[in-house]
Image: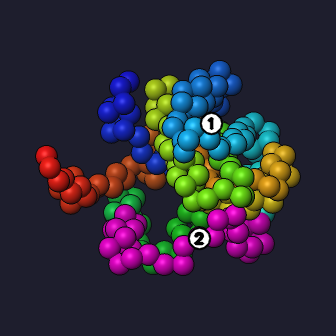
Amino acid sequence: MNVIEALNTRYSARAYLEKPVDRETMLKIMEAARHTPSWADTQPWEIFAAGGDSLERLRRAFLRRLDEGRAIEPDIPRPQGWPPDLQQRMAEMVAHGQRVRGERPDDEEVRRQSMRRNLSFFGAPAVVYLCLDRSLSPYSVFDLGMMAMSIMLAAREYGVDSIPAVNLVGYPDLLRAELGIPDHLMIVMGVALGYADPGQLVNKPRTPRRSVDEVVRLTGF
């Protein structure tokens, strides 16, 4: 699979088959992703990957927190608002998914199940947690974003699907306890990996992307 094909076929899978990502495949994905560029070659990322019994313990613990009514508290606070055009795109994404899945916009049970799906890591057999030293600047968060994309594109080479999501790191204290992540590291983002279940409606929607003409301003070309 070439890079263009990987970019065009990657999507955020929200339901996975009960098929593990084996250790060898995980290491191949990480071997490729380690070539990600970074500011002055600092390579600031620290990566913790969970699967098997460890991930199942985390899954159960996250759902217990949800059932207790405890709000997620990621190390990087969630945005309090979005510019109107971004808010509109998010609303269109939600509406598109509801149409494809045949859901009513006012169905509270659907919303509840959606949150449970998020906090059970979408049923993925593996989650990669991307961390940074707390002393680093937002530029290193940019480096971590590139690492996340490298992981997801490398995963496509091996037929592995993915989704990056802040809810995967919603209860950082649980992650630290299970995975031994030290306090000086900020848990920035999670990337779930696995084999998408093609029979699940949540995997059917494909949202449109803004056109090149809308996004890119070329000067001197």
Residue 131 magenta-drawn?
no
Find numbered disc 1 in the image and state the secondary structure of the residue it sits on.
loop
Q: Which residue is mark 1?
A: 18
Residue at 77 percent across and 66 percent down: it is 65
Query: Start and end of the magenta stretch?
Result: 65-94
Q: Position of residue 15 (x, y in %)?
A: 54, 47
In the rendered image of this protein, does residue 85 appear above or below residue 96?
below
Find numbered disc 2 in the image and state the secondary structure of the residue it sits on.
loop
Location of residue 90 by image quarter: bottom left
The answer to whether residue 61 shows anywhere in this view is no
Residue 66 magenta-drawn?
yes
Q: Position of residue 192 (x, y in %)?
A: 59, 45
In the rendered image of this protein, does residue 87 appear above or below residue 156?
below
- Quick check: 52 left or right of 27? right
Q: Position of residue 203 (x, y in %)?
A: 44, 48
Labels 1, 2: front one: 2
Q: Position of residue 122 (x, y in %)?
A: 59, 50
In the picture as drawn, the residue positioned furthest to the front comes out as 40
Q: Which residue is mark 2?
A: 78
In the rendered image of this protein, does residue 17 appear above or below residue 209?
above
The answer to whether residue 181 shows anywhere in this view is yes
